[in-house]
């Protein structure tokens, strides 16, 4: 057997599954939470998966030409995955990112060979809180650069390959848990993880219930009003806008998580489980604990721990 890999992207995926025994015990809830350690991917987030799938699909369909520049609007994680994949496959990569995201991500993408364009936030915006309006400004800038540089836009928000990458995530979950899954939940960014995992898990077993997790201030899929301009601290998700790749048919329920709850749970994950992750991972686990409290039944919930806590050392998370 070959004992090495030829390119770093070959180790994307196949992440371990951790049962959060200490969290469920600490919160005194019945049932189990299984967390897929996606922050152990080479770019330290689950977004390595769609990055690889989008580039491979675009190369094989011919929509990405050999040597063509790739561009993406990113909160940093998809960009990190794309930087890794593009470098290995011979494409220059440009990341367009809001100033509101933590700067570790920009530094990391640059170190990985990417060109990073930071787009200033709107008038009333706050660093560390990227609103839908901020994202619109990034989109406008990206459109400009796309034309100037004749680049290929990876476009995680609309590409089928971005959610299809997570069929594999779901298959891994299914195999790791021997199909013993009652609930899947995920906080929505592009909605790619939710759509891919929910679709595939329901193909395995139509009884699996899938919950969309959203920040309290930006719970648009749950049908709630947007509060405080949709601002929140859970980076990488909750843009309070329509997500083209999300299919509401896969949503069996909705859970909202506030900033403070997400932050507390992120700290608990580090302290109790040794899982050093970011805000959105805390949000997912916080949502799971809420559901277990409400249902008070011995069920198995599966979710992803999305990215590494190392990406937030410049924030007040830790
Ligand atoms: C830290 C983090 N959490 C959650 C998400 C949301 O994942 P998805 O785009 O699959 O909905 C992202 C997306 O970039 C992210 O960076």
Image: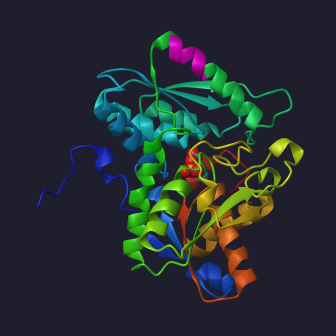
* Residue sitting nearer the eye, 161 or 259: 161
Q: Quadrant of residue 90?
A: top left
Q: Is residue 167 visible?
A: yes
Q: Is residue 306 visible?
A: no
Which SS does the magenta portion mostly show?
helix
Is 236 magenta? The answer is no
Question: What residue is drawn where x is 32% and y is 22%?
Answer: 65
> What is the x, y in percent for residue 208?
54, 74
Relative to 143, say whether 237 is above or below.
Answer: below
Q: How many marks?
A: 0
* Residue sitting nearer the eye, 164 or 150: 164
* Residue sitting nearer the eye, 78 or 270: 78
Question: What residue is drawn where x is 74% and y is 45%?
Answer: 240
> What is the x, y in percent for residue 279?
66, 56
Q: Quadrant of residue 216?
A: bottom right
Q: Look at the image and give the residue range highlighted in magenta.
A: 142-147
* Figure quadrant of the C terminus: bottom right
* Figure quadrant of the N terminus: bottom left
Residue occupying the far left of the picture: 1
> What is the x, y in percent for residue 223?
80, 55
> What is the x, y in percent for residue 135?
69, 33
Left or right of residue 257: residue 30: left
């Amino acid at each position: 057997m070959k004992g090495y890999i030829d390119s770093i992207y070959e180790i994307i995926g196949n992440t371990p599954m951790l049962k959060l025994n200490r969290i469920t015990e600490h919160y005194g809830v019945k049932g189990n939470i299984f967390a897929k350690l996606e922050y152990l991917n080479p770019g330290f987030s689950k977004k390595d998966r769609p990055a690889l799938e989008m580039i491979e699909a675009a190369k094989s369909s011919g929509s990405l030409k050999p040597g063509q520049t790739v561009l993406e609007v990113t909160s940093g994680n998809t960009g990190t995955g794309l930087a890794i994949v593009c470098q290995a496959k011979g494409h220059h990569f440009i990341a367009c990112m809001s100033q509101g995201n933590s700067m570790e991500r920009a530094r990391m993408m640059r170190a990985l060979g990417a060109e990073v364009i930071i787009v200033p936030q709107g008038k009333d915006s706050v660093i560390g809180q990227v609103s839908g309006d901020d994202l619109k400004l990034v989109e406008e800038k990206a459109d400009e650069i796309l034309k100037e540089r004749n680049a290929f836009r990876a476009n995680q928000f609309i590409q089928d390959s971005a959610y299809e990458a997570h069929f594999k995530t779901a298959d891994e979950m299914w195999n790791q848990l021997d199909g013993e899954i009652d609930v899947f939940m995920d906080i929505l960014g592009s909605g790619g993880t939710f759509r891919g995992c929910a679709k595939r898990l329901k193909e395995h077993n139509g009884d699996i219930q899938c919950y969309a997790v959203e920040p309290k201030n930006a719970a648009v899929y749950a049908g709630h009003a947007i509060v405080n301009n949709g601002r929140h601290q859970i980076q990488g998700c909750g843009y309070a806008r329509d997500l083209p790749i999300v299919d509401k048919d896969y949503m069996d329920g909705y859970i909202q998580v506030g900033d403070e709850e997400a932050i507390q749970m992120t700290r608990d994950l580090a302290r109790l489980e040794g899982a050093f992750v970011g805000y959105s991972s805390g949000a997912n686990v916080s949502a799971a604990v809420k559901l277990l409290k409400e249902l008070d039944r011995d069920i198995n919930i599966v979710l992803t721990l999305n990215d590494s806590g190392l990406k937030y050392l410049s924030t007040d998370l830790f």
